[in-house]
Image: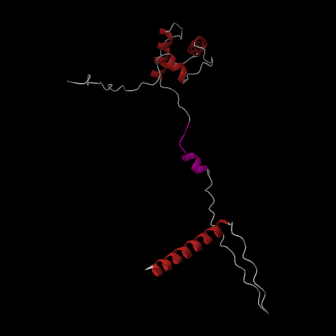
């Protein structure tokens, strides 16, 4: 039984060492084999590791660039502009008519609102300005779990 174990252990070790040696050669970290003594009239055999297969990533062609999705932020809809104008008017700023057309008066009103809220007065609609106007993200509220267990019963 001990003999069978020893044989299987040696076979596993030999397999692992050969696999490790092959992996080291493909990574280029293997040391070159020592040169064998020259025999009369024969050139030493040169052992070379196979070249690693490299694959260049595909180049982006004009056709691929046209197919790439647009990742820029799009303009709000006219209704959203109207909501923002109404919120500015409700907060005491004059954005002009609340018709959903974002003009110079709307930009000036937003800049004034941003200045009063200690935000950078860019006049551009951003997340912090919308949150301070009460127009930030609307999350669906789920009912809170209630603790129905009252003290220990006797």
Front residue (pair 42, 16): 16
Q: Which quadrant is the C terminus positioned in?
A: top left
Tell whether position 66 is magenta. Answer: yes
Most extreme residue toward the left is: 154
Q: Number of callouts in the render? A: 0
Q: Please provide percent x and percent y for residue 82.
A: 47, 17
Q: Going by the image, does 83 lie left or right of 115?
A: left
Tell whether position 76 is magenta. Answer: no
Q: Which quadrant is the N terminus positioned in?
A: bottom left
Residue at the spot 47% in from the left edge and 77% down from the top edge? 5
Dominant SS of magenta comes to helix
Q: Please provide percent x and percent y for residue 128.
A: 54, 21
Q: Please provide percent x and percent y for residue 50.
A: 65, 72
Residue at the spot 53% in from the left edge and 10% down from the top edge? 96
Front residue (pair 151, 135): 151
Most extreme residue toward the top is: 92
Q: Going by the image, does 118 lie left or right of 130?
A: right
Residue at the spot 67% in from the left edge and 73% down from the top edge? 49
Task: Write down the quadrant of residue 26 in the picture.
Answer: bottom right
Front residue (pair 63, 11): 11
Q: Please provide percent x and percent y for residue 16.
A: 55, 71
Relative to 61, residue 118 above or below: above
Residue at the spot 63% in from the left edge and 63% down from the top edge? 54
**Range covered by the magenta-colored residues:** 62-71
Task: Write down the quadrant of residue 17 in the picture.
Answer: bottom right
Protein image colouring: secondary structure
């Amino acid at each position: 039984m001990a003999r069978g174990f020893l044989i299987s252990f040696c076979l596993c070790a030999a397999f692992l060492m050969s696999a490790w040696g092959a992996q080291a050669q493909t990574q280029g970290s293997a040391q070159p084999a020592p040169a064998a003594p020259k025999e009369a009239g024969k050139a030493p055999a040169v052992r070379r590791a196979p070249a690693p297969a490299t694959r260049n990533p595909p180049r982006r062609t004009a056709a691929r660039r046209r197919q790439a999705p647009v990742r820029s932020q799009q303009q709000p809809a006219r209704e959203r502009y109207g909501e923002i104008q109404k919120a500015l008017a409700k907060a005491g700023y004059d954005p002009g008519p609340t018709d959903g057309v974002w003009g110079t008066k709307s930009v000036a009103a937003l800049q004034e609102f941003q200045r009063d809220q200690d935000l950078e007065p860019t006049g551009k609609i951003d997340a912090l300005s919308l949150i301070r106007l009460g127009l930030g993200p609307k999350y669906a509220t789920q009912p809170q779990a209630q603790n129905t267990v009252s003290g220990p019963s006797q």
